[in-house]
Image (spheres, helix red, strand yellow):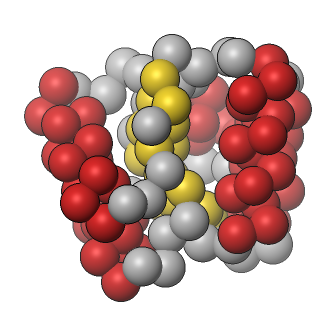
Amino acid sequence: MSKVLSGLGLAMRAGKVVTGDESVLKAVRSGEAKLVIVAEDASENALKKFRDKCATYKIPLIIGFGREELGSSVGKPERVVLALIDQGFADMIRKTIVKTSEVEYIE
């Protein structure tokens, strides 16, 4: 498993990950979300929704990994969207992604 997915698992165990459409949208709107990750195989509708919301609220957005990979990294079934609510974990994931370039899109 990649360092990014391992980092997500660590953040989940620390209680710093929010999953699910509505929970992530709530975290984005409240400013609690520090980084949003959307699965590359998410629907066009979901991609547009999170791109727009993250741009509006100036939250960094990453599109990458499959829904199975995201889910298994946090110990859940398939996940389309995750939000990190801790700046330290968000910074760690962003730095790792920049180094490894495992994702298709970073905004």
Label count reads 0
Q: Whole-percent x and y of residue 101?
A: 70, 17
Lateral position of residue 1 relative to residue 81, left or right: right
**In the depicted view, which residue is nearer to us: 43 or 54?**
54
Quadrant of the image occupied by residue 97: top right
Image: 84 above or below 52: below
Quadrant of the image occupied by residue 85: bottom right
Residue at x-position 42% and y-position 79%: 31
Residue at x-position 70% and y-position 69%: 87
- Whether residue 58 is visible here, answered yes or no, is yes
Image: 29 above or below 63: below
Residue at x-position 80% and y-position 18%: 100
- Residue furthest toward the left? 45
Lateral position of residue 83 relative to residue 92, left or right: left
Q: Whole-percent x and y of residue 98?
A: 73, 28
**In the depicted view, which residue is nearer to us: 78 or 82?**
82
Where's the C terminus, which quadrant?
A: top left
Lateral position of residue 50 relative to residue 62, left or right: left
Quadrant of the image occupied by residue 28: bottom left
Residue at x-position 27% and y-position 42%: 51
- Residue furthest toward the bottom? 30
- Whether residue 77 is visible here, answered yes or no, is no
Where's the N terminus, which quadrant?
A: top right
